Amino acid sequence: MNSTRTLPLVMGILNVTPDSFYAGSRSNSEKDILVRVEKMISDGMDILDLGGQSTRPGAIYISAEEELNRVLPVLISIRNEFPSLTISIDTFYSEVATSCLREGAHWINDVSGGRMDSNLRNIAAEAQCTYVLMHSRGDSSNMKELANYENVVEEVYAYFQMEIEKLNQLGISKIVLDLGFGFAKNKEHNFDLLRNLERFTKFGYPVLAGVSRKKMIQQTLGTTTEESLNGTTVLHAFALDRGASILRVHDVLEAKQTVELYGALTFRS
């Protein structure tokens, strides 16, 4: 193996929300937030993904104004305390992205793929920032009903072909692909996509795997969200073996250890 290859990155999740599906990712007080971020950095986090809106099935979306009121003070505090940290803003609102980029955020993580706010991509193009393009359908109220595919791998692949071209036409070249595990996909769809993740690396962009503590694990093992760390680690190892460049995770230390062991197995000096 070529020793100059770089290890995949770990993106840690920080939700300033009262209702995200995994309670361990939620933070509220400024002190609690800064302590949590410091621990994530110590555990090996490469990128922080900051979100102020739950996108789990059944969640009620809040306004851009309320989301901004949640995330902007947190972003400013984190940037002041950890100025070298790369921060991604998990939002589908252009107003939120604009304000956060102005205050030092680096990435836009758009779970809607531009469907919720068409101006968001223009913001990414103007800023020349990294844009995470996720495949999804519908919204939190109806995504379960839209999990209908003749061939999920082919249809998600075709989606990326079309959307990457649109992004390139806007001048966006820093793209990360997220297959959208759990977003308008059932357990079988999720495993089909994970099994074929390597195919999506053919686009030449990093592929992000967001399987941390997802329902596909609980449905398979009969566990709860809180009991899903071991299953998450297994799927992370598989995703890395299939070419994932970024793991988006709730548990940074365990993910970082998985990445390091993967590197020891596959990289050789």
Image (cartoon, rainbow, N blue to C red):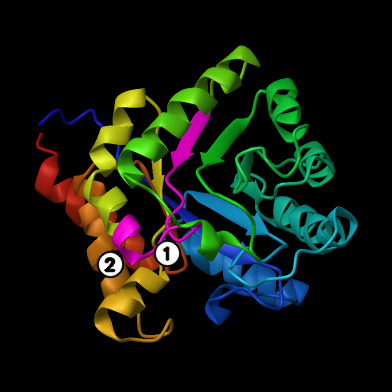
Q: Is residue 192 left or right of residue 135?
A: left
The numbered disc on residue 7 is none
Residue drawn at point x = 56 percent, y = 73 percent = 25
Instruction: Say which amino acid is labelled 1.
Output: Val
Q: Is residue 39 left or right of residue 26?
A: left
Q: Is residue 236 above or below residue 231?
A: above
Q: Nearer the viewer, residue 189 or 107?
A: 189
Residue 252: give its label. Answer: 1
Residue 23, relative to residue 105: is it above or below?
below
Amino acid type of the residue that numbered disc 2 sits on in the rendered structure: Thr
* SS at mark 2 in the image: helix
Q: Nearer the viewer, residue 98 or 61?
A: 61
Task: Find residue 255 and report its horizontal and vertical position in percent.
Answer: 34, 62
- Quadrant into which the N terminus falls: top left
Q: Secondary structure at mark 1?
A: helix
Residue 154, position as x, y percentages in the image? 32, 36
Q: Determine which of the numbered discs, if any, sits on residue 233 in the image.
A: 2
Give residue 35's quadrant in the image: bottom right
Q: From this viewpoint, is residue 66 visible?
A: yes
Q: Which residues are magenta?
A: 175-190
Q: Can you give x and y, in whole percent of width and height, for residue 112 in the image?
A: 62, 46
| Disc with the residue nearer the chain's start (2 vs 1) | 2
Residue 206, quarter of picture: top left
The structure residue drawn at horizontal position 57% and vertical position 53%, both measured from the top left corner, is 48
Label 1: how many Cα within 10 Å (few below 14, some 14–19, many 20+): many
Crowding around mark 2 (Cα neighbors within 10 Å: few <14, some 14 to 19, many 20+) is: many
Residue 157, position in %: x, y? Answer: 37, 34
At 60% from the left edge and 40% from the top edge, which residue is drawn? Answer: 113
**Along the line of sight, which residue is nearer the eye, 165 or 85?**
165
